[in-house]
Amino acid sequence: MIDTHCHIFLKQFRDDLEEVLQRSESAGITHLFMPAIDFGSLEAMNELQHPSIQFHKMAGIHPTQVDGTQSGVEETLRNYCSRDEVIAVGETGLDYYWSTQHKPLQKELLKIHCRVARELNKPVILHNRDSTGDLLDIIEEEQDGSLKGIWHCFNGSPEEGRRAINLGLHLGIGGLVTFKNANVDRSVAELPLEKMVVETDAPYLAPEPHRGERNEPSFVVHTARKLAEIFEKPLDQIESITDRAALSLFNVKA
C-alpha cells in the first residue's frame, strides 16, 4: 500500500520515528510520498531511511508559508525539482482559511509551481482550503494538456471533483472520507475510483477510529477500508487500483 501524502519528516515524529516506520512496514506500506512545506523540508527528508520502505521527495512552498518574503522562487524551485530524486512539485495551492492577506501572492506562487511542473513533466500537489473556485480556475488557466497532479485532501462536491478530473487531476482521499459529518464519502461515491489515490497527510487529519490523534502512514489502511465500503470492493482491489494510479502518476516503479 502507498501513502501518497505524508510529512513524516516533521518534528512530530522525532521521538518515535523508528516505531512509526515499523508500524508502516507492518501495515504493508511500501512507498511514502513526502510533499514539502518549504525548501528547508528537503534536508529533513534526506535523513529518512528504512530497508523496506521507499521515500519519495517533493519540493515546493505550502500556501500557509507565503508571507511576501519569497523572491527568486521560480529559479530555486526549478533547481530543486530538476533533481532526479524529487518526483513532484509541491505542495502548493491556496489556503484562505488561515490567511487572506497574501491571496495575490498565493495565486502567483501556485502558477509558478504549475509552470515548473509542466516544464519538468512532474505532478503538482495541490493544497486547497476555502479556495476551491480560485484553485480550479488557476489550474484551468495553466492546463495546456500536460499538467497533472493531485487535489490533496479532496473535500469537494461531486461536480467539483469531476471538474478537477477533467482538468487532469487525481483526487487524494484521506481521513476526511471517514468522518461521519464531512459528507466527503457521498462525493467520493459519485466519482471514478481509478482517479483516486490514498493518503494520510500525517501528522494531520487522522482518520476514524484515530480521529484527534497524531496521524501516521499506517493509518492509511482505514481510508482504504472506507473506499472498499463505498465502492463495495475487496480491500486488496482498492489497494491495487489506488497503488497503480499513484505509481503511474509519479512515474515510480513498484
Image (tube, rainbow, N blue to C red):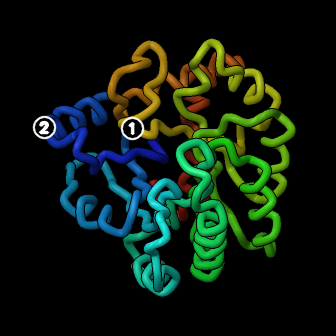
Q: Is residue 50 shown left or right of residue 63?
A: left
Report which quarter residue 166 is drawn in: bottom right
- For label 2, the residue is 15
- What SS does tag 1 mark? loop
Left or right: 53 in relation to 5: left
**Can residue 212 be seen by looking at this rendering?**
yes
Label number found at residue 12: none
From the top left corner, tell me how far across and down residue 204 is, in percent. 41, 34
Q: Which residue is drawn at 26% across and 29% down?
A: 23
- Residue at (81%, 70%) from the top-left corner? 141
In this rendering, the answer to whether 151 lies above or below 76 is above
Q: Quadrant of residue 225?
A: top right
> Around disc 1, counting alpha carbons within 10 Å, would you say few (fewer than 14), some (14 to 19), or many (20 or more)?
many
Earlier sequence position, callout 1 versus callout 2:
2
Q: Residue furthest left?
A: 15
Look at the image and tell me whether residue 248 can be seen.
no
> Pointer 2: residues within 10 angstroms few (<14), some, or many (20+)?
few
C-alpha span from label 1 to label 2: 15 Å
Residue name at image x 38 percent, y 59 percent: 56
Where's the N terminus, which quadrant? top left
Q: Which of 59 and 192 is in front in this view?
A: 59
In this rendering, would 71 be left or right of 193? Answer: left
User: x, y percentage for residue 109?
Assistant: 59, 70
Which residue shows up at 61% across the image and 52% down it? 100
- What residue sits right under mark 1 in the picture? 202
Q: Picture coordinates of residue 44 (x, y %)?
A: 24, 60
Residue reaching furthest to the front: 101
Amino acid type assigned to the residue bearing label 2 in the image: Asp
Q: What element carries label 2?
A: loop
Position in image of residue 218 (x %, y %): 36, 30
